[in-house]
Structure formats: structure tokens, C-alpha cells
Image: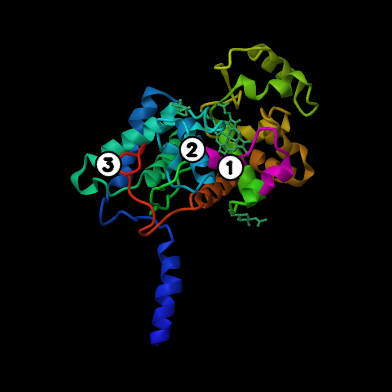
């Protein structure tokens, strides 16, 4: 019996505490989801960029060092995670959303310094998806904030727009996400923008998988030597609505990146694209399952990490 207790303490307890759960803050800050949602609503009213910026920030955070808000860390010497070349295009409104929601949470006496930045980002992400027309889902909580944030550790951990299906599958699989998860999560490109510089090669080299008319439109919007700050919508049809039109675009050869279009071009993933294009509920269900899995990647729980007082600084 004593042996079993020891086994439990040493082996099983850490596993138990490593679980995220709904209502993690029910005793400490019962209204946290309501508070975050209000802050996100206010921020979204100021600018729609809030939605895509927050969603992409969550993805980048989770894929490098786990969902631990390490991407939020500011760096006087430009060497933190957010300064890596892949993060340079993260829109500031995602960071601002988390800062505002954190301020709102901390304004409530009982909640002050009790809720992690990582959880606030996870809640805000759920909220922007829903407010942009996507599904509502219960968000798992209990993440702690990470103590490492380094640009040099980002390399090779984020997918590139030039990736083929094997490369995408390999990278997502290394974070515990299967091909269906990867395809569903790619549906996040139903909102938001890309800088022209990301697609120059593709639109001027006549990628045969790219719709001819769409290619011509893209060449007009993104001429050679375009101002590198110019960005275009990734879903040309409903850029501000979280819907399944992204998958219908792929069927038309209107995926913006190679990594988008390949999901339809490659026969191994085409059936799933067709399913999500035909059935919004199927897409939403798969997306919720996948983003819930994404939210578990590399999380710190229990007494690992910290609850940051300022999301952009280690305590
Ligand atoms: C599958 C591999 C993926 C690749 C190769 C990829 C690549 C990119 C690139 C190159 C951009 C444009 C950045 C810019 O020029 O500003 C972008 C934007 C975006 N990505 Fe992805 N991404 C992938 C998956 C995801 C996932 C899984 C999510 C979220 C669940 C996501 C969410 C977004 C959002 C919302 C934007 C728009 C950001 C904005 O408007 O500020 N992406 N992505
Ligand atoms: C992929 O993961 C999802 C859950 O996110 C699951 O429903 C599905 O069965 C998995 N697919 C495969 C082929 O393992
Ligand atoms: C070098 C640097 O800090 N790049 C950017 C990373 O992302 C944030 C948020 O948008 C920007 O403010 C930084 O300029």
C-alpha cells in the first residue's frame, strides 16, 4: 500500500496535474471567461485585425515551447521568440488583446495575478473565432506561463507557406496533431491577411495549381517590388468571416499559399478538403477538436512556470 502511495505521488500525480480542465478558475476567479470576453469585444470593436492577430498569435505560441505565452515576451535586445523572422509579421493587435484582457482580469481584486497570460490568450482566441462567426467551444484552462522566450529556438518549428503535404504533416505530427487536425486548423486562413512578399514567387512563377484569374488579380494587388508592408486578404471572398469558404476556395485553385493549395492538390488530403467545403458543421467540429489539441501542446501546469504579472515580462 505504501509502495502504491509512493508510486502515485511520484508517477501518477504529475500526470494528473498536467491535465488542463474547464473551470480551472472557478474558485479563484469565477468570472474570468466573462471578463476576457468583454475585453475582447471592446478590442474587436476598435479593429477587426484583433481576430486574425490573436488567432495566429496563439498558433505561434503553441508551436514554439508550447502554449505558455512565451511569444508575448518583449525584448530590449530583439532576441525573444517574437523577434524571430517568422514572428516579425505577427500583428501587434494580438499582443494588445492579451494585455487588455489581462488588465481587465487583474482589475478584479480576487483575480489579480491568478490567471496566466497563456490561459488569457487561449480564452481570447476562442472568443475571436466565435465573434468572427466561427463555433463557440469550451476552452480548457490551467496553463502556466513559460520562463523561456528565445528567437533562436523558433527555427524550424513553424510551418512555411512553401511546404508540401509531407512537410506539413511532419511538423504538425511532431506536436501531436494529425493530418485532419492540420487541415482543419489551416481553415484559420479564412480570416486575416498576408503580406505580398510571401507570395511573390508563387504568383510570378505561374504555379499551375493556382487559378489563372486569381493569379492575375494577385499580380495586380501585389506587383513586383511592392511595398513590403502591403497585405492582402487570404480569403478573398469572406475575409472577415470564420467560415468554410476557405475550403471552397481551395477547390477553385484559390488557396493563397502553396501550403494551402496543396491540401486540395494532393490526393491524400483532398477528400477532407471536399468534406469541409461541403459541410460547415464537419469543419467546425474538426476545428474545435484540433484547436483543443493545439491548446494542450507543451503546456506547463501545476507549479511549473509562473503566473506572469506583466504578460510581456518574466516575473
Ligand atoms: C499549415 C501551415 C501554416 C502556414 C504555412 C501558415 C503561414 C502563414 C503565413 C505566411 C501568413 C501570412 C503572414 C503575413 O505575411 O503577415 C499567415 C497568416 C495567418 N495565419 Fe497561418 N499558417 C499556417 C497555419 C496556421 C494555423 C494552424 C493558424 C491558426 C490556427 C493560422 C492562422 C493564421 C492567421 C489568422 C493569419 C492572418 C494573420 C493576420 O491577419 O494578422 N495559420 N499564415
Ligand atoms: C485525428 O484527430 C482527430 C481529433 O482531433 C480524431 O477525431 C481523428 O480520428 C484523428 N484521425 C486519425 C486518422 O487518426
Ligand atoms: C523585432 C520585433 O520586435 N518585431 C515585431 C514582433 O512583433 C511585435 C508585435 O507586432 C512587433 O511590435 C515587433 O516590432
Which is closer to the viewer, label 2 or label 1?
Answer: 2
Which circle marks residue 185 in the picture?
1
At which x and y percent is residue 95?
A: 41, 32
**Which residue appears farthest toward the front when viewing the image?**
77
Total marks shown come to 3
**Distance from mark 1 CB to nearest ligand 1 atom below 8 Å:** yes
The quarter of the displayed image where residue 28 is located: bottom left
**Element marked by disc 3:** helix
- Name the residue rendered at 68%, 48% in the picture: 170
At which x and y percent is residue 82?
A: 48, 34
Is residue 100 toward the left or the right of residue 126 in the image?
left
Image quadrant occupied by the C terminus: top left
How many residues crowd around disc 3 within 10 Å: few (fewer than 14), some, or many (20 or more)? many
Image quadrant occupied by the N terminus: bottom left
**Distance from mark 2 CB to nearest ligand 3 atom below 8 Å:** no
Which is closer to the viewer, label 1 or label 3?
Answer: 3
The stretch drawn in magenta includes residue 263: no
Is residue 177 toward the left or the right of residue 136 in the image?
right
Which is closer to the viewer, label 2 or label 3?
Answer: 2
At which x and y percent is residue 217?
A: 68, 15
The stretch drawn in magenta includes residue 156: yes
For this rendering, which residue is in front, 257 or 134? 257
**Element marked by disc 1:** helix
Which circle marks residue 81 in the picture?
2
**Element marked by disc 2:** helix
- Name the residue rendered at 26%, 50% in the picture: 29
| 215 vs 65: above or below | above
Q: What range is drawn magenta here?
A: 151-170
- Name the residue rendered at 24%, 47% in the picture: 111
Tag 3 residue? 105
For this rendering, which residue is in front, 251 or 81? 81
Q: From mark 2 to mark 1, how far is it between C-alphas?
A: 22 Å
Amino acid at each position: 500500500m505504501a509502495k502504491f502511495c509512493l508510486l502515485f505521488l511520484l508517477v501518477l500525480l504529475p500526470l494528473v496535474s498536467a491535465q488542463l480542465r474547464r473551470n480551472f478558475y472557478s474558485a479563484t476567479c469565477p468570472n474570468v471567461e466573462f471578463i476576457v470576453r468583454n475585453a475582447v469585444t471592446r478590442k474587436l470593436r476598435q479593429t477587426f485585425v484583433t481576430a486574425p492577430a490573436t488567432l495566429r498569435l496563439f498558433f505561434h505560441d503553441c508551436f514554439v515551447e508550447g502554449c505558455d505565452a512565451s511569444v508575448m515576451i518583449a525584448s530590449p535586445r530583439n532576441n525573444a521568440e517574437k523577434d524571430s523572422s517568422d514572428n516579425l509579421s505577427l500583428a501587434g493587435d494580438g499582443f494588445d488583446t492579451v494585455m487588455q484582457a489581462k488588465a481587465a482580469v487583474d482589475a478584479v481584486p480576487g483575480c489579480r495575478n491568478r490567471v496566466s497570460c497563456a490561459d488569457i490568450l487561449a480564452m481570447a482566441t476562442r472568443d475571436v473565432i466565435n465573434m468572427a462567426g466561427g463555433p463557440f467551444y469550451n476552452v480548457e484552462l490551467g496553463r502556466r506561463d513559460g520562463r523561456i522566450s528565445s528567437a533562436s529556438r523558433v527555427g524550424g518549428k513553424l510551418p512555411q507557406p512553401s511546404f508540401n503535404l509531407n512537410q506539413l504533416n511532419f511538423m504538425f505530427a511532431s506536436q501531436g496533431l494529425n493530418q485532419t487536425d492540420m487541415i482543419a486548423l489551416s481553415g484559420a486562413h479564412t480570416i486575416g491577411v498576408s503580406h505580398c512578399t510571401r507570395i511573390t514567387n508563387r504568383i510570378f512563377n505561374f504555379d499551375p495549381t493556382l487559378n489563372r484569374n486569381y493569379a492575375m488579380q494577385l499580380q495586380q494587388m501585389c506587383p513586383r517590388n511592392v511595398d513590403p508592408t502591403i497585405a492582402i486578404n487570404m480569403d478573398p471572398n469572406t475575409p472577415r468571416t470564420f467560415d468554410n469558404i476557405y475550403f471552397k476556395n481551395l477547390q477553385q485553385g484559390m488557396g493563397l499559399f502553396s501550403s494551402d493549395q496543396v491540401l486540395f492538390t494532393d490526393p491524400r488530403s483532398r477528400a477532407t478538403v471536399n468534406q469541409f467545403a461541403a459541410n460547415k458543421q464537419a469543419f467546425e467540429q474538426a476545428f474545435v477538436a484540433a484547436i483543443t489539441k493545439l491548446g494542450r501542446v507543451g503546456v506547463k501546469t501545476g507549479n511549473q512556470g509562473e503566473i506572469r504579472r506583466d504578460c510581456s515580462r518574466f516575473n
